[in-house]
Image: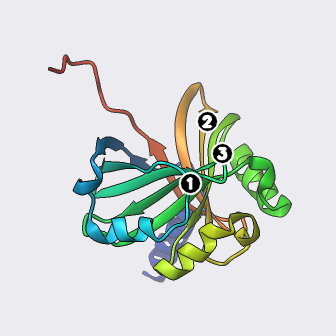
């Protein structure tokens, strides 16, 4: 009985430590909405950001939840701030140049991607901030100086070629380059006519 228990524990550990490409699936559909359709609390947060760009609002539908997103350009970088349907801040993401990542973090991420894929091509890199409204506001005001903050995460979207198939993935890394989440991006089946 004890051997079976140990065998079961060993299997659980091994399956948890195997290749990261065992991923959740991600599907998102964004629809443009008018600012008046966005939650009041979300609009108040966006109004508190000193930005220069025009704000575009979107309603985002995913496999398990809906949200609102405000997108704008500030300091020549695209910003995306996501809110729950009630207006609660979920996260803020800012476009990031790959070479702006801390070198040791970048090396860890690259090693992970090389381990998971025969070949990969980066499509998008973003720094992601989570926390209280005040913390996120202070982090997005100085994004270049805040890359080592404990709440910082990095989101990479890339094409991965492995075993003859090519798929799009989204990886979420912590500030030290450790994988937190892997999602395989799925696309809407459009083989049927839509009216």
- Judge left or right: residue 76 versus residue 45: right
Q: Identify whether 10 is placed above or below 53.
A: below
Instruction: Give the class, few, some or many, for how many residues have Cα within 10 Å of label 1's Cα (few <14, many ≥20).
Output: few
Residue displayed at 69% across by 69% down: 142
Which numbered circle lies on residue 102?
A: none
- Pinpoint residue 101: horizontal percent, then vertical percent: 77, 57
Q: Disc 2 to disc 3, how far (Cα)?
A: 8 Å
Q: Between tags 3 and 1, which lies in front?
A: 1
- Pinpoint residue 98: horizontal percent, then vertical percent: 75, 48
Q: Between tags 1 and 2, which lies in front?
A: 1
Q: Quadrant of the N terminus?
A: bottom left
Q: Between tags 2 and 3, which lies in front?
A: 2
Identify the mark nearer the N-term, 2 or 3. Answer: 3
Residue displayed at 54% across by 74% down: 136
Res 36 quadrant in image: bottom left
Instruction: Give the class, few, some or many, for how many residues have Cα within 10 Å of label 2's Cα (few <14, many ≥20).
Output: many
> What residue did someone put label 3 on?
116
Q: Disc 1 to disc 2, how far (Cα)?
A: 36 Å
Res 106 quadrant in image: bottom right
Q: Disc 3 to disc 1, how far (Cα)?
A: 40 Å
Residue displayed at 49% across by 68% down: 12
Q: Which element is circle 1 on?
A: loop
Q: Kindly indicate whether the residue at mark 3 contacts the one at mark 2 (C-beta within 8 angstroms).
A: yes
- Pinpoint residue 153: horizontal percent, then vertical percent: 61, 65
> What residue did someone put label 1 on?
52
> What residue did someone put label 2 on?
160
In this view, the residue in front, 41 or 29, is: 41
- Judge left or right: residue 29 versus residue 134: left
Name the residue furthest left. Answer: 195
In this view, the residue in front, 141 or 110, is: 141
């Amino acid at each position: 009985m004890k051997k079976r228990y140990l065998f079961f524990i060993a299997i659980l550990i091994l399956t948890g430590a195997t290749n990261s490409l065992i991923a959740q699936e991600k599907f998102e559909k964004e629809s443009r909405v008018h600012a008046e359709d966005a939650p009041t609390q979300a609009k108040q947060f966006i109004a508190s950001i000193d930005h220069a760009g025009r704000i575009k609002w979107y309603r985002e539908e995913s496999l398990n939840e809906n949200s609102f997103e405000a997108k704008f350009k500030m300091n020549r970088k695209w910003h995306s701030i996501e809110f729950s349907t009630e207006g609660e801040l979920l996260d803020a993401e800012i476009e990031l140049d790959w070479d702006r990542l801390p070198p040791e973090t970048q090396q860890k991420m690259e090693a992970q991607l090389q381990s998971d894929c025969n070949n990969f091509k980066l499509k998008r890199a973003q720094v992601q901030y989570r926390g209280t409204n005040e913390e996120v506001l202070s982090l997005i005001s100085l994004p270049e100086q805040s890359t080592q903050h404990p709440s910082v995460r990095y989101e990479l979207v890339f094409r991965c070629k492995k075993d003859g198939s090519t798929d799009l993935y989204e990886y979420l890394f912590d500030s030290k380059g450790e994988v937190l989440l892997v999602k395989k991006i799925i696309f809407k089946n459009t083989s049927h006519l839509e009216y």
